[in-house]
Image (cartoon, rainbow, N blue to C red):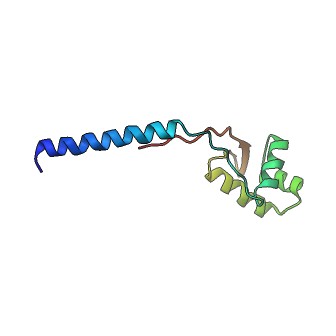
Amino acid sequence: MRNFEIMAAFEKVLKRLDVIDAKVSGMPQVQVQVSSRFLPTVTALSSLGSGTASQVSRVTGRSRAFESKNLNDLHSMGLLSKQGQGRMKIFSSRKVDAPKADF
C-alpha cells in the first residue's frame, strides 16, 4: 500500500469512530438490573450502609458463604467497593454511572 492509500483508509476509520462516538453519546443512561439472586444481598447491604458477609447474611437469612460469593460477584461487576480490615472484608455500595465507550 502506498502512503496516500494508508492515509485514506485511516481517515475513513476516524470518520466511522466519530459516528460511533456521536451515537454512543446520544444513548440514554444505562440502568443496572439486579438478578433475583443478588436482590436480597443488595437490599440488605443498602439497609446496612456497609458491612461484612456475616452481617448481610443475618439480614437475608441466607448462609454467610452464599452472601460472601454474592458480594464478591457484585464487587467484580463494579457495583460494590471492598475494603479489608485484617481478615474481614467490608463491602459498601458504589454509585454507578453510565458506562463510557472506549474506541
Q: Would you say 7 lies left or right of 49 here?
A: left
Which residue is situated farthest in the left direction here? 2
Residue at (80, 40) in percent of width and height? 49
Looking at the rendered structure, the number of numbered marks drawn on it comes to 0
Q: Would you say 88 lies left or right of 98 here?
A: right
Residue at (75, 56) in percent of width and height? 38
Q: Position of residue 65 (x, y in %)?
A: 77, 63
In this view, the residue in front, 9 or 36, is 9
Q: Would you say 98 lies left or right of 37 here?
A: left
Q: Is residue 48 above or below residue 77?
A: above
Q: Position of residue 91 (x, y in %)?
A: 72, 46
In this view, the residue in front, 85 or 52, is 52
Q: Position of residue 36 (x, y in %)?
A: 78, 59
Residue at (87, 56) in percent of width and height? 60
In this view, the residue in front, 22 or 61, is 22
Q: Position of residue 67 (x, y in %)?
A: 77, 58
Q: Quadrant of the C terminus?
A: top left
